[in-house]
Structure formats: C-alpha cells, structure tokens
Amino acid sequence: MWVTVSAAAYAGLEALAVYFAYRAVARARTPQGAIAWVIFLITLPWLSVPAFLFLGHTRYRGYIVARRDSAEVIAGVGSFRKASPTRGDGGVFGFRSFEQIAELPVVGGNGFDLLINGQETFAAIFAAIDAAEHYVLVQFYILHDDRLGRDFAACLARAAARGVKVRLLYDPLGSAGLGRAYPESLRRAGVEVVNAHALRGPRNRFQVNFRNHRKTVVVDGQVGFTGGLNVGDEYMGRSAKFGPWRDTHCRLTGPVVMQLQLVFAEDWHWATQVSLIPDLAWDPAPDPADLDALVLATGPGDLMETGALYFCACIMRATRRVWIASPYFVPDADILTALKLAALRGVDVRILVPEVIDHIFPWLAAFAYFDEVREAGVQVWRYRDGFMHQKVLVVDEEIASVGTTNMDNRSTRLNFEATAVIFDQGAATKVAAMLEADFESAYLLDKGLEEQPWRIRIGAPFARLLAPIL
C-alpha cells in the first residue's frame, strides 16, 4: 500500500513538473530562463516543483491592469513636455528610446544633487521632511526598527504632528523582519502606513518574485529623493558584518519630481485603490540649473523588457566611456552582448562590483561572467573598502543615472525599480568624478575563473544556472 501511494505521489509530482515545464517554456521571458527551469523541473521534481511555486512567476499581469486603470485617472498630467521643454535635444540618438521605455517625456528645468553616503542622504532627507508644509510621500524596500529606523520614524512623526499628511509604503518581503510594533507606532503618530502587497498583492501567496524595490521620498511635490539606500543602520556603516557602506542617492528638484511622484501615486493606487492625484501638487518650481531629466520606472508589469532596455540604451549610446556600478553583476544575454560590443569598438567599459559578499549566489554567479566580458576588453573593478551597494551609471559626458536598478535579472525583470536619468554634461562629470574616487578604493580584476579559489571555481558555474531568478 505504501509503495502504491508513493508511486502515485511521485507520478503526480512528475506530472506537475511537466506542466510547470510547459509554463516555463510558454511564459519565460528568456530562452535561458526557460531551459534552466525545464532541466531543473524534469531532473529534480521534488525540489524544483516547490521552487517553481515560489520563484517561477515572471509576469505580474494584475499590475498591468492596475497601471492602465491608473493611467486613465492621471491622464491630465500627460502635458509634461509642453510645460517643461528640454534645453537639449539628446544628441545624435535623441531622447526617444528612453521616453518610450519610461512612457514619460524628458523634461527640462531640473536640479540634481549627488548624495554619496548614508550620512549625506539621510541628513538631506530629514531636512526636507522637517521643512514639509503639506505632504510627504515615502517608499522603501527595507525598513529596520533600529537606530536609523527609529530616527526616521521620529522625523515622520514630527511632520505628522505639524499637520503634514505623511504616507509610507513599504515592501513586506524586504521588510520581513520589521514586525508590527514599528508600523503601528507610526499609525498612532498619524502616519498612513501601507504594506505594498497587503490589499492587492500577488493573487497567489507563493508569488514572492514581485518585490517593490523602489526607494522614494517626495516632499510637497517640490523635492524628491531616490537611489540605493534603504532605512537601516547598515546603510550608515554601523554593521559589524559589512563595515563601511558605500551607496549613492540623489536629490531632485524641478519638473522631474512630478514623475517620481507619479510613480509613487501609481504604486499607492495599486496597493490601496485610492488615487492621490487630486491631493498632490503638480507644479514644482523650475530649478535654475535647468537640467534635462527623466524618471524611468521599470517592473514586471511592463509590456516590454524595460529594465534590460534601459541598460542597453545607455551602453549603445556610449562613444568614449560607460561606467556602471552595481552590487550584483548577473546580466542577461542582451546586456552582456551590448557590453562586449561597446568594449570591442573601443569604449572604456568599466564594471564596479563589491569584493564583500552580501548574497552568496549572485556574488558567485558574477564570476561566471567576468571572463567573458574581460576577454572583450571590459574592465572589472572590485570595491574593497566595505560593501558597495550603489546603482550608478555614466555615459560619456552625456548621461548620468542614479537609482534602484541592479545589473541582474531580478532587478531588470522581476522587481519594480526607479532610476533618475540626467542628460547633462555637468551631472555626468560629477558622477564620473565620484566613480573615479571609488576606483581608488578598488582593484582591477586580473585573474580568470580558473585562477580563483576552488569554492569560486566550482560554485560560479552552478550559481550561474540560477541567473534567471538572481
């Protein structure tokens, strides 16, 4: 009897694995991802079927519908370009590819300030919130109930006590260890706190792929912040494990703040079915710096491969240099090809990644790509002065971007991300100078995979098999 039941259970598991393999082939966004899942499902069904339930979803179809609904509500803000004409024309390539990816126009009249570490970032954010008069919009992937988290909560509570409307959106997976006391204390202080997936999250409780990785603060519709930093002591360099924490945020002013605010309003609408559009200000004062800029929000609800297209659009424009800083380097085939072609045509292509391990699988998988890009002439620099978490890019003297998007499949395909893209020589020069200082704290990788310690030589090829979900 036991043998019969076991055989039947195994047969059922195999049938489920075959069905999931079909779904992987039919719905996977890349052939590599489909092949990886098919092999995994057919050979190890007892392990792969539960894994597919949690990780095998690559489209957030409900979010697509929500974005279209939201777009109808916010149709009145479609006049960004007319109200805020650009100073430049985007050069030979123009702005069109970025505008098509973002579904928003490049706008002029903006200001851009680099915030190079946790101290600079949160000092600027706290000052902006303390000066708020009407409302504060806050969104973070990770919130910790630690020293910085409590300081941040106190800042939000002070604003609420002054009569400022404060809204906080957080991702439940990124903030899994937060507990109930932190959000409840904020609610008692008058802050409206929303779990991004509490009301309209994934329809299947197994869907953990779709994380809202955005980090946004908008104050009164006049100033906005985005970048790599979350709210936790490690981002201030207080972690015994990671030591100094190298990260970058940016402060935005001008019409581009409307776009950052629009992305927040869209996420809020998805989470709550409440439109913030009538309650928000949509007339930010132009900044004298008059920079051309765009907020590019990407995610699995998009109809196109917007995350990968963003990287490819930047890399393909480069004629002199493209420098990219990312804590994870697990590029898809299109990004990998674009990097190699840029290097082969003589562009100075540099990838800055951390030496310190954060998540072991993406860290290992990166070694499986290093030889391939180095053979084409791409320089791989490994940052060693603590952990480097910034998501920054510079192209020639033309483009600078700071945001939340890592160079891995999870960021480009599975997470909701936001990146500020600045089309300005001065901004590009500032970001390049910052990265040059980072290269001083890094070393140029000159050893191939076969020269690495045995655990990397063995682990990297296997970790690369997980690339579609890393």
Image (cartoon, rainbow, N blue to C red):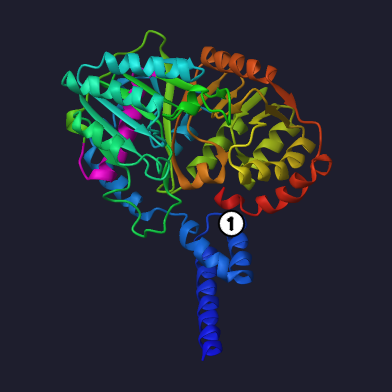
Q: Is residue 87 visible?
A: no
The secondary structure that most of the magenta stretch takes on is helix
Depth check: give the residue in front, 285 or 189. 189
Depth check: give the residue in front, 94 or 459. 459
The location of residue 18, given as percent across then percent down, is 54, 74
**Badge 1, how many Cα within 10 Å: few under 14, some, many 20+?**
many
Q: Would you say residue 177 sits in the magenta stretch?
A: no
Depth check: give the residue in front, 384 or 87. 384
Q: Is residue 447 left or right of residue 417?
A: right
The location of residue 400, given as percent across then percent down, is 53, 22
Residue drawn at the location 24% of the way across and 43% of the way down: 72
Q: Would you say residue 258 sits in the magenta stretch?
A: yes
The location of residue 190, given as percent across then percent down, is 18, 29
Depth check: give the residue in front, 47 or 290. 47
Q: Quadrant of residue 160?
A: top left
The location of residue 327, given as percent across then percent down, is 59, 34
Rendered view: 172 above or below 397: below
Rendered view: 3 above or below 29: below
Residue drawn at the location 24% of the way across and 24% of the way down: 157
Give the residues in magenta: 252-275
**Furthest residue to the bottom?**
1
Q: Amino acid at mark 1?
A: Gly
**Residue under pointer 1:** 33
Total of numbered circles in the picture?
1
Q: Is residue 19 visible?
A: yes
Q: Quadrant of residue 252?
A: top left
**Furthest residue to the right?**
451
- The secondary structure type at the circle numbered 1 is helix
